[in-house]
Amino acid sequence: MSLHAKLCAILTAEPLRLEVLRQVRDLNLPDCWVAAGFVRNAVWDHLHGFSAPTPLADIDVLWFDPAQASAEADARLEQALRRADNRHNWSVKNQARMHLRNADLPYASTTDAMRYWCETATAVGARLNPADQLEIAAPFGLDDLFQLLVRPTPRFADDKQTIYAERLRTKNWPATWPKLRCVEAARAERGQGEAPVNPYASKD
């Protein structure tokens, strides 16, 4: 079974995640995906053999439309999702404006925006199409995600490596998923392979 098929099986096997994907699809937003921890944590939970999903801090809903690139538009969408289901902390971000916050050049699409995220394993999104088929966006592939490898994307292995290091420290993912292997940004940049990192801050 391919990694793509494995990921689809993991996501569709969990009723809550499948329900979220349907709720987001119903928004009918252009280039819209549910991404980050929503996808990543499901795989890490599965590979650790957890019997129940790890609670999500929020659900990241990404879309792309330069004609509606305002924080107010995102806030209205978050309100609509909360009215439909107030069990979750919804976070909606139009990626057509997020390059301004991140000090990047404008993004061309949601998948392009994910190339500028911090870790390769986090840069994965999913969505249901109108035929109820699951689609996956993974600009860096799925290998790192399924190998339980936390590795910086090129931008965060270079001029943003201090942000990556701080994120490892504050997230402290190995406290929840002990099989994870974390790569230091400086080591990744020099091509020196995997160097374990032991974050010490409490998990957010």
Image (spheres, grey):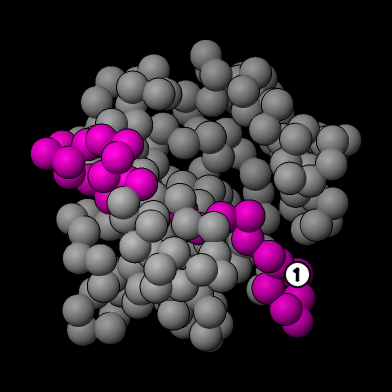
Quarter holding the C terminus?
top right
User: Which one is nearer the viewer's eye here, 160 or 183?
Assistant: 160
Q: Is residue 109 above or below residue 53?
A: above
- Where is residue 174 shown, x and y percent of the image? 80, 50
Q: Is residue 138 above or below residue 17?
A: above
Locate residue 197 relative to residue 17 in the image: left or right. Answer: right
CA neighbours of label 1 inside 10 A, class few (<14), some (14 to 19), many (20+): some
Identify the residue at horizontal 28%, vertical 31% (top origin): 97
Locate residue 80 relative to residue 69 in the image: left or right. Answer: right
- Where is residue 135 shown, x and y percent of the image? 31, 69
Identify the residue at horizontal 28%, vertical 20% (top origin): 105
According to the picture, the residue beneath numbered tag 1 turns out to be 48
The quadrant in which residue 109 appears is: top left
The answer to if 154 sits in the magenta stretch is no
Region of the chain picked out in magenta, as a range: 47-75
User: Which one is nearer the viewer's eye here, 101 or 31?
Assistant: 101
Please, what secondary structure does the residue beneath circle 1 have? loop
- Where is residue 75 shown, x and y percent of the image? 36, 46
